[in-house]
Each structure stands twice: as structure tokens, then as C-alpha cells.
Amino acid sequence: MRSLYSDRRTWLHAVPAGIKLLVIATLGTAFFMVDRPAWLAAGAGAVALAFATLGRSVRPALRLVVSITVASALVAGFHVAAGQPEVGAVSVLRLMSASLLGVMLAVTTRFDELLDVFETLLRPFERLGFSTGRLALGLGLMLRFTEHFFVQWRRMDDAHRARTGRPGGMALLAPLTVRMLLTARRVADALAARLGG
Amino acid sequence: MSRAYSMADPDSAPRIGIDDVTLLRGSATVFRGLSLTLTERRIGLIGDNGAGKSSLFRLICGLDAPASGTVRVCGCDVRAERARLPGLVGLMFQTPDDQIVFPTVVEELAFSLSPSGISRRQARAQAREFLAGRGLADWADRAVESLSQGQRQHVCLLAMLIARPRVLLLDEPYASLDLPGQAALAADIEHAGQQILVSTHVLEHVRHFERVIWLDRGTVRADGEGAKVCAAYETDVRARAARQAPADTPPQQVCDAQPV
């Protein structure tokens, strides 16, 4: 599976995964509870600043950030056309902030750190007889597949540009879905072979 | 010639026993009544695409269930005793991206130790030691994304080796490697202590093996010493290519001749 993780270490690599997840959960909730554009703009500015401090480590994810920006611009344009610029600003600021936080997590966090957090959180379920190791792996893989989706999309978009000279856009959605399903099956096979499941 | 073996003593058993296996995929029959006893240290699998090489590997590591017959590795039924398999057999897939789940090398190797039940911290420490023992200590914290295709393939092999299975199945491991990568992998295979089965289209890498099996549409077309079986397969491929080549096509001109 492809990944956005960067081995160029930053200050955020040293922050425990549990704290990163807590910050994302807290800020994510706050961004969706606050609806004053000025406050949201301040929050988004702080997130963007934190993102910028990661420097060249975020390079693997820059195309993803550009895609999010384009999507945000489309959302904003739609709301402006509908005569609701303030709603558009709120939506875009929330979208950009939450996405940048997610990208920062993916770029600076090892997978087994996330598994440690999930296993700790799921520990109470062990008493009920659940295999929390497998459950944590499943949750972690859900995040890994999100990363893999974007990296795969970028590769298919490159292939589309090379052959047609223009970006793939929505035309990539069906082949990308098929590719992701095939990857899911192969990863499941690899896990079954390695874990004996 | 069939060789009897005792299930009670895995060490004396042939490493892999495939007994009268029929494998169906949809409406197609991949294998019908296939029987093989695989005991040699190095075994090559050759044949055209679709001959059944990958399917045979999937059977051996329990990923595919035969419609009838049994597959045993070191006396262990691969379908009935799946939990024991990670310690017995490791499969390296054709594409490293399908096999590598973790974003860094040390995590990927440590994950192979998880069936043994040790903690993740211990597994990471062992993975670092394992890499250091091979002069690759600086690989530990590298992002897999930053590695070349050959290096990723190497990570897949290391992730198998660290689990110390008794049998390694390598499915077309040379397919996407450059020549230095192929040479490095061939050296790794040469030095590994396990029984190794390699499926490949690059015959040079299995020609010296003590045993090579040529699969053809799910049946064993030839089985024996590597040099002889590879030569037979090459002769067959040349004959088929000659039959398919259009007889009356003139040789293509490389460039137009200019009048002097």
C-alpha cells in the first residue's frame, strides 16, 4: 500500500499519536460547532501555519492539498453563485482545516503508533471477548486505505495526463474504485498469509 | 514415485505434499487431480502466464481452498491449521505494494512477528536488530514510499525472512527488478536456509536449481533437473513462436534507402 508518511523528521513526528488524534478530534469538533467566519478564519490560519512549519516533509502530500484547495474553491464558487458567500466561507474554512489536520497526521505518524492508540482505547472490549488487536488493525487499515486512495488517484491522474495531456478528473472514479477493490483483496490475501487468519 | 511421510513428525516429512488436488475458479478448472511432493531445497516453477504457478502458491499457503484433495506443509493441513502457517510458509507477492501494509520499514518487518504473540515494542526492537545484522540499520526508519522498487522487493523478502518460515514462496520476484536488483535477490535466495520455491519467467535464475517444474494449463508438463526442464520449455516456446510467425512477411526496413 502506498503512503503519505515522510521520513524527514519534524517536530510533529515527536508528538505522541494519541495527542495528535485528540487534537484533531477536539479541533475538528470545534470547527464544526463554531460558525462565525472570523473565528474559523483564525483557526484555519493557525492550522495552515502549523502545516507550513513542517516544511519539505509535506511534499508527498502537496498534490493532495492542491486538490483539496480546488474542491474548496468549487464549494465557495457554488455558494457565491447561490448568494450565500458567508456559508461558503464557513464551509471552505472547515473543509480546509479538517483536511490539513488529517494530512499532518498522515505525514508524521507511523502506523504502529496509531495501532497502539486504538488498542489502548479498545482494551475494555477485551473483557467482552473481542480480539482488539484485529479490531485495531481494521480501524488502522481504514485510515491507511484513505491515504492509499489519494496516492493511487495521483498515480492514475499522472498516467491520464501522460496519455491525454489533461487531468483525469471524474473519469478516474470508476477505474480508481475497481483498483481500490482489487488492492483491498490483495492486501487481505497478504494479511491472511502473514497472520494465518 | 510417491514418498510416504508421517504427520506426527514434521521434521522428517516432505516439506510440501499436494495430494490429488482439484482447484476450481468460477467455472474454470485450474488443477485437476494434481499431486506433487516437493522436498528439494530450491524448486523453480516455470510456464506461460495462466499456467497455474500463482494458483499453486495460493494453494500452498492456504489462500485458495481446493475442491478436493489436500495440501500439507511440513505435515500441517494448510486449510485446517491456518494459524500454524505463518511459522511454516511465507509468500512474497508479485507486487510489493500489495504486500507492504506499513509506511516504514521497521514497522513492516515487526508486523511479521505479530503471530508469535510478542509485544509491538519487542517486535520493533527485533526488527531493528535484524536489519542491523544485515548492514541495513539505516533502513529502519525510512519511509517505504522513498524506496526504489528493488528495495521494496527486498523489504518484502526481509519481512518474510524475519518470521523464519520453513518454506518461502516467491511469485515472479524478478518481474520488476533491474539487473543489479535481480542479482541481489538471487544472492539472497542462494544464502537463505529455507526451502524456496520460485516462479519466474527469467529462466536464468532457476536453470541451476535441482528441480524445476514446468506447468502448462494446470498440468505438469515436465518435472526434473533445472537445466533440462528449462531447455525443454524454451524449445517449446521457440516452436510455438515459429508456428505463429507469418511466413510471408518481408523483413521490415529499418530506414528508407536513399538513392546515391
Image (tube, coloured by chain):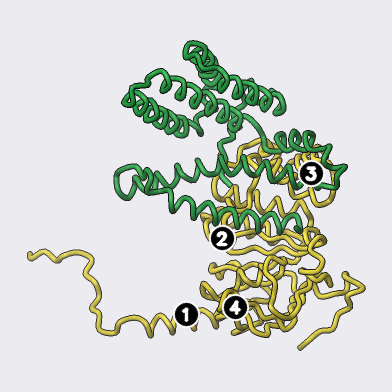
Tag 2's secondary structure? loop
Tag 1's secondary structure? helix
> Which color was chain A given?
green
Callout 2: 10 Å neighbours few (<14), some, many (20+)?
Answer: many
**Which residue carries the number 2 mark?**
B174
In x, y percent, where is residue A10?
61, 23
User: The chain coloured yellow carries which letter?
Assistant: B
Which tag, 2 or 1, sits closer to the chain's start?
2
Q: Amino acid at mark 1?
A: Val
Tag 3's secondary structure? helix
**Which residue carries the number 3 mark?**
A132
In this view of the protein, which residue sits in the foreground, B62 or B8?
B62
Please identify the residue farthest to the bottom as the structure is shown: B1
**Which residue carries the number 4 mark?**
B30
Which tag, 4 or 1, sits closer to the chain's start?
4
Tell how many labels: 4
